[in-house]
Amino acid sequence: MSKRPDITAKLSQLVEKRLDSQNMYWSPEVNFDGGKKRVDFVGLHSKLGAPEAVAVELGQFEFYEVKSSMADFTSGHGLTFYGDKNFLVCLPELAQQLVEQQAIPERVDMILCPDKSWKRLVPKIDRMRVGLHRERTAAEILWEIVKTHRESEEVFDE
């Protein structure tokens, strides 16, 4: 597997599988800052398990950025980490390069890589912080997820 789009697609499928398995409300390609920043995946994990408004405020927002190569990582696109938990998803080789170059972004809590069978994501580097650390309000993050869903529906309705 050497082509960037193929690697990105397979890594993205593993992120989707992870989000689904954790029963998260999630969306791909969520825009922030008036469309200037985009996150590959944003998920909301409600600690209360109920569809109450307070569940959003007390829930945890997870941000996932998928990077297929060092060129992708340094492209200037992505690397938006506004969540309570922030994950970089990449190949083990890229994770190792980032460690060696001390280039892991400050807000990255964990680097996830595919297991040997490409069936799930496993932690490669874990710098997980305790507690909520989001840089944006829950309302803003949820609103951007809702707008993303609305825009995708408009595309399919045409």
Image (cartoon, helix red, strand yellow):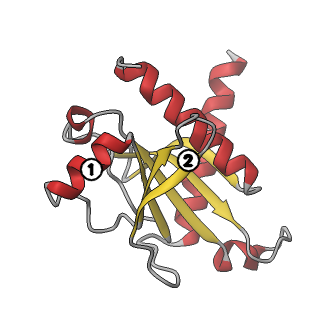
What residue appears at the point 30 percent right and 41 percent down from the top-left corner? Answer: 93
- Report the front residue among 115 and 105: 115
How many numbered callouts?
2
Mark 1 belongs to which amino acid? Gln
Q: Based on the displayed image, in which of its 4 quarters is residue 104 positioned?
A: bottom left
Query: Residue at position x 53%, y 35% from top?
Result: 12
* Marks 1 and 2 in Cβ contact (< 8 Å): no
149 with respect to 132 (left or right)? right
- Left or right: where does residue 109 sit relative to residue 156? left
Does 43 appear above or below 130?
above
Q: Residue at x 28, y 40 (%)?
A: 77
Q: Looking at this view, name the residue that lies furthest to the left.
A: 101
Image quarter (top left, top right, bottom left or bottom right) of the C terminus: top right
Q: Would residue 7 be found to the left or right of residue 59 on screen?
A: left
Indicate whether 87 appears above or below 120: below
Residue 66 appears in which quarter of the rendering?
Answer: top left
Give coordinates of residue 145: x percent, y percent: 59, 50
Q: Position of residue 36 (x, y in %)?
A: 32, 45
Q: Name the spot of residue 68 as percent of width and height, x first.
A: 35, 33
The amino acid at mark 2 is Leu
| Residue for badge 1 | 96
Furthest residue in direction bottom, as rendered: 131
Residue marked by disc 2: 121
